């Protein structure tokens, strides 16, 4: 029996071709992969998209381990994307596998994966969808971002060690709590009136200019 996911499928459909990376997340085994790789692909095919214009890759598959290297991933994707006017839909499952532990620990440069995603976005005929685990709400842990609990719970749900996590935050409170959890932090500059830009940049391990950059879209 197939479980209907009409709402989530429609969320993807209405965002097709919007010029941004679509990020699909949720707890493990909640059906993200089935939603994108089965239901959304079926929609694309039924809409007339040629099968060779759908490029899907699961980075948690051992057979695809070589593509966890961002350069190899980019080369593979470019080889699959043609120069014709038709849109190529790039579906990347478990995208976090393309970020190395060294990159998570470093603070001088952003992960090379960002360059891959930015490069894809600059191509006029590419639409990108990425999947990763998981979502945690403050009410689930009984406190807000003034304590490290929410970050630690997120790490637990994706079976990650805190030292291997990178937290993107725009407020000092969240950055400090994430650091208390033993995680690396990246300050995201925003128009949030509560943000003190100097404080967040000085406190975090690194910083980026906007949430769009965090999603791999630095187009202005």
Image (cartoon, grey):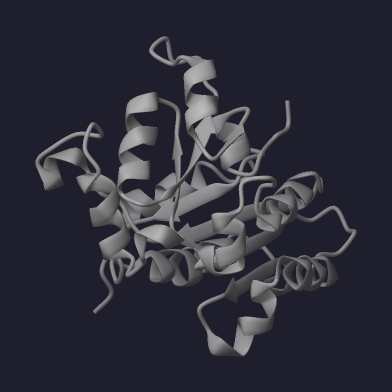
Along the line of sight, the residue nearer the viewer: 209 or 73: 209
Q: Which percent across, then down, holds residue 8?
A: 36, 52
Q: Is residue 62 left or right of residue 144?
A: right
Along the line of sight, the residue nearer the viewer: 60 or 206: 206
Q: Is residue 87 left or right of residue 41?
A: right
Q: Which percent across, then down, holds residue 180?
A: 31, 44
Single out the residue that lies furthest toward the top. Answer: 193
Q: Which percent across, then down, holds residue 177?
A: 30, 38
Q: Is residue 127 left or right of residue 15?
A: right
| Quadrant of the rendering where the C terminus is positioned | top right
| Quadrant of the rendering where the N terminus is positioned | bottom left
Single out the residue that lies furthest toward the bottom. Answer: 63
Q: Which residue is located at x 55 percent, y 75 percent? A: 58
Residue 116 visible in the picture? yes
Residue 27 visible in the picture? no
Single out the residue that lies furthest toward the left. Answer: 142
Q: Which residue is located at x 19 percent, y 34 percent? A: 144
Q: Which residue is located at x 68 percent, y 45 percent? A: 108
Q: Which percent across, then down, holds residue 35?
A: 40, 65
Q: Which residue is located at x 35 percent, y 34 percent? A: 176
């Amino acid at each position: 029996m197939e479980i209907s996911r009409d709402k989530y499928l429609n969320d993807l459909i209405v965002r097709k071709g919007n010029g941004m990376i679509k990020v699909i997340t949720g707890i493990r085994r909640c059906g993200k992969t089935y939603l994108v790789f089965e239901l959304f692909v079926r929609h694309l095919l039924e809409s007339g998209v040629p099968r060779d214009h759908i490029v899907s890759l699961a980075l948690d598959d051992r057979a695809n381990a070589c593509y966890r290297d961002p350069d190899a991933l980019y080369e593979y994707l470019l080889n699959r994307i043609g120069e014709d006017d038709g849109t190529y839909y790039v579906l990347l499952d478990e995208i976090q596998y393309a970020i190395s532990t060294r990159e998570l620990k470093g603070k001088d440069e952003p992960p090379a994966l960002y360059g891959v995603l930015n490069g894809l976005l600059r191509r006029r005929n590419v639409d990108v969808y990425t999947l990763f685990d998981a979502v945690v709400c403050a009410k689930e842990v009984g406190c807000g971002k003034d304590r490290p609990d929410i970050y630690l719970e997120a790490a637990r749900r994706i079976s990650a060690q805190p030292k291997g996590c990178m937290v993107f935050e725009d407020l000092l409170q969240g950055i400090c709590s994430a650091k208390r959890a033993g995680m690396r932090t990246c300050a995201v500059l925003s128009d949030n009136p509560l943000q003190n830009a100097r404080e967040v940049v000085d406190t975090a391990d690194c910083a980026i200019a906007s949430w769009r950059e965090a999603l791999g879209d630095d187009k202005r």
